[in-house]
Image: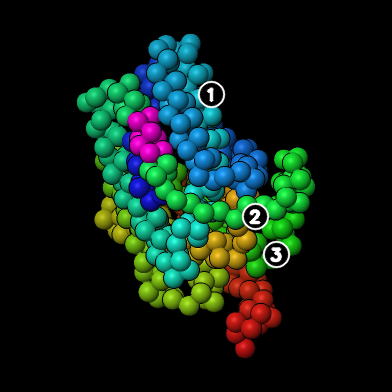
Amino acid sequence: MWAAQAISNFGDWFGLLALYALIAKYSDSEFLLGLIIVVKMLSLAAFSPLAGFITDRFNRRMLMLLCDGLRALAVLGILFVQSESMLWLAYVLTSVQMMISAVFEPAKTSSIPNVTSKEELVNANIISTATWSIIFTSGMAFGGFATEWLGIEMVLILDAFTYIVSGYFIYHAVIPQQEMSAEEKEKNRNPWNGIVDGAKYLIGNPHILRPSIAKGTSSAFLGGLVYMLIIVSEEILMMGSIGLGLLYAARGMGTGIGPIIGRRLVSEEKDWIKLMGAAIGLAGIMYMIVGLTNIIWVMILFVLLAHAASGANWVTSTVLLQKRTIDTFRGRVFSTEWLLFTIMNSISVMIASLVLEFELVPVKTLMLIYGAVMAGAGIVWSLTITRKEKVYQREVGLIT
C-alpha cells in the first residue's frame, strides 16, 4: 500500500506541470490555467459524499485496483487534446480523474489501520505523510524537467504508467476489511441512505467530529497563504519559478518533518486535540513572519516551520479518526473530512485571489491578515474544541 501511494502520488505531481503546459500551449488565458485548479478541487469535493459510501459498501482493495486502472485511462485520454478546440476534454478528464481519486484516497486511508497494529499506526501515518512531502518536492521538480525534455505527451504516458504500477502493488497487498452486516447492506442499498447514515454517525459522535474538522480549519487559511506564495515569488522576490520552487520545497520538507517533531514533543494521544489547536495557531504566526520579511531565506525557514505545524496537525487528526471510527463508517468519515478540506481550501484561495485581483490590499498585508486570523482560529480552537475534548476524556476515564 505504501509503495502504491508513493508511485501514484509521484505520477500526480509529475504530470501536473505537463497539464499546465498543455493548457498554456493552446491558450494564453490565465483564467483557463487557474480553472484547472478549481476543477480539480471541486471535482474532489462534489464526489466525496458518494465516494465515502462506495468505500464503506464495497471491497476497498478491489476499489483501489479499479481506481488505478480508470485513472490511467483518464490521463491517457488527455493525449487526444491536440488543439485549442479540444481543450475542454482536458478539463473533463481531469475532473473524472479527481472524482476517481475521491474514492481511492479514503479507501487507502481507511485501510491503514487494517494492515498495521495499533502500535504501528502512528508510524505508518508519519511515513505516509513524509512520503507525500518527498514526492511533492521531487515530483514537481522532475515533472518540470521531464516536460521540457521529454515533451507533454511522454510525461502524460509516464503519469498513466505510474497508476498501473500502483495497481500492481495493490493487487499483491493483503487488505482485511470488516464488511457491513446483511442488515446494514440492506439499509444502505440506496446511496442516499448510506450518505445520510454516515452524516448522522459523525454528528452523533462529537469525539470523532472534533478531529474531522482539524484539516478543514487549517486549510481555510493555508489554502490562500500557499496561493499567495506564487504572488510573493513573482512580485516581491522577483524570482519567478525559482523562488516558488524554493518556497514550495520548504513547504514539502516541513510537512514531512512536522509529524516526527510533533510525536516527539506530544507523545500522549490524550493531548493531540490540544496539539491541533496549537499547530493551527503556530502556522498562522509563522506565516505572519513570512508576511513581514522580504528576505528569501527567512521566508523559506518560516514557511517550513508553518507547514511542519500543519503536518503535525494532519497526522494526529488522521490517526485519531482511524482509531475512533469503526471500520464500516471509516470511508464516509474520511470522505467527509476530505470534503471539508477541499471546500475550505477552494474558498480560501478564491477570497485571496479576488482581494488581490481588485487590489484591495497588497499581497504582504493580506498574508499578515490571513496569518493573524489563523492564529486567532488556533486560540478559539483551544478555548472551545480542546475544552470539549477534556470533558469527553473525563467521561471515558482517560483523565481525572
Give, as a three-letter code, the residue at label 1: Val
Secondary-structure class at tag 2: helix
Nearest to the observer: residue 303 or residue 118: 118
Q: Marks 3/1: CA distance?
A: 37 Å
Q: Marks 2/1: CA distance?
A: 30 Å
Residue in the picture at 54% in, 29% down? 96
Write down the quadrant of residue 360 in the picture. top right
**Residue 361, x across and y down, in percent:** 51, 46
Mark 3, residue position: 205
Give, as a three-letter code, the residue at label 3: Asn
Nearest to the observer: residue 212 or residue 193: 193
Residue in the picture at 49% in, 49% down? 108
Q: Return the residue found at the far bottom.
A: 400
* 214 in magenta: no
Q: In the rendered view, would you say 345 is above or below 92?
A: below
Range drawn in magenta: 160-168
